[in-house]
Image (tube, helix red, strand yellow):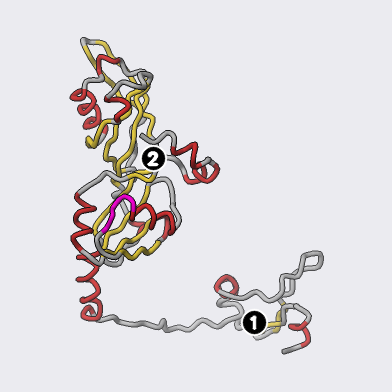
Amino acid sequence: MTEEVRRGEIPSYRDATTGKGKNSQPAAGKQNAGLVLGATWQASRRGKFLPCAEEKPQLVIPPSKLERYRRYMKDHAMICKFVGVWPSENDLTRWIQQNWQPLGHIELKLGAKGFFMVIFSNPQDKERVFDNGPYFYYNAGLFMRYWQECYNPDKEKNLASPVWVRLFGLPMDFWDPEILEGIENTIASFVTIAETTKKGRHTSYARICVYMNIANPIPDTLELEYHEEVWQKTLDLNIYPLDAIDVMNMDTWSKSAP
């Protein structure tokens, strides 16, 4: 180890393009950060201090290598995401056991952007879970899809999930279940009507649940027409941005669940 490394200083490196030595020590007045390691360092200096190879390493993976894995995953796995909130692994495990009550073992794998993969040892558990629902983590609806090979969350264009919608100031004349179901199908796809709305507990708003693809533009108002009279109602969707969830008290948030 050189003396300058012992002192926490950044040693000199030879510029691969000019052949001249350069010292990447921070300018005077800045705090010495020590040796900078890892991908960030390489990315900022590659081609300047590190020569770039003309040929890229390449590995060709034969399809037969993954055939057994793909068959198993198609039968046993699905991809999920709670829209608007990212529960921890422990919270997800506890939620799955309480709400799905699987007969077999479950393996949970967390992914990017709140996506997670559930692998069922018993494929009948997967089909039963997929056929039932909707599912919620407090107010956050669950997006589900069958496992897909080489899945990339950044390219997901279908985030269809159950979403709770409140219609403030909806006249009680329109609280008939068939009318509410018609409203839901106008917005998206009918799922259910909240028990509080069925029983008329909160007459300031009607609460309905729809399946909606939130990856697409979402309407903010609904227009109702009856006897040449038109009502425009704002659609209050229970989809919280992640930064709002982080600062909200979970107990307070859960009280708004149906």
Q: Residues within 10 Å of mark 2 (few under 14, many from 20)?
A: many
**Residue 116, located in which quarter of the rendered image?**
bottom left
The quarter of the rendered structure image containing the N terminus is bottom right
The residue drawn where x is 24% and y is 58% is 146
Secondary element type, mark 2: loop
Q: Which residue is mark 2?
A: 139
Q: Report crowding for label 1: few under 14, some 14 to 19, many 20 or more residues within 10 A (C-alpha).
A: some
Residue 37 horizontal side relative to residue 213, left or right:
right
Which residue is drawn at the image coordinates 27% and 59% (left, top)? 78
> Which quadrant does the C terminus fall into?
top left
Q: Check the image and report above or below for 254 versus 95.
A: above
Front in this rendered view, residue 98 or 154: 98
- Mark on residue 15? 1
Q: Secondary structure at mark 1?
A: loop
In the foreground, 39 or 138: 138
Q: Which residues are magenta?
A: 98-102
State the image quarter where residue 186 is shown: top left
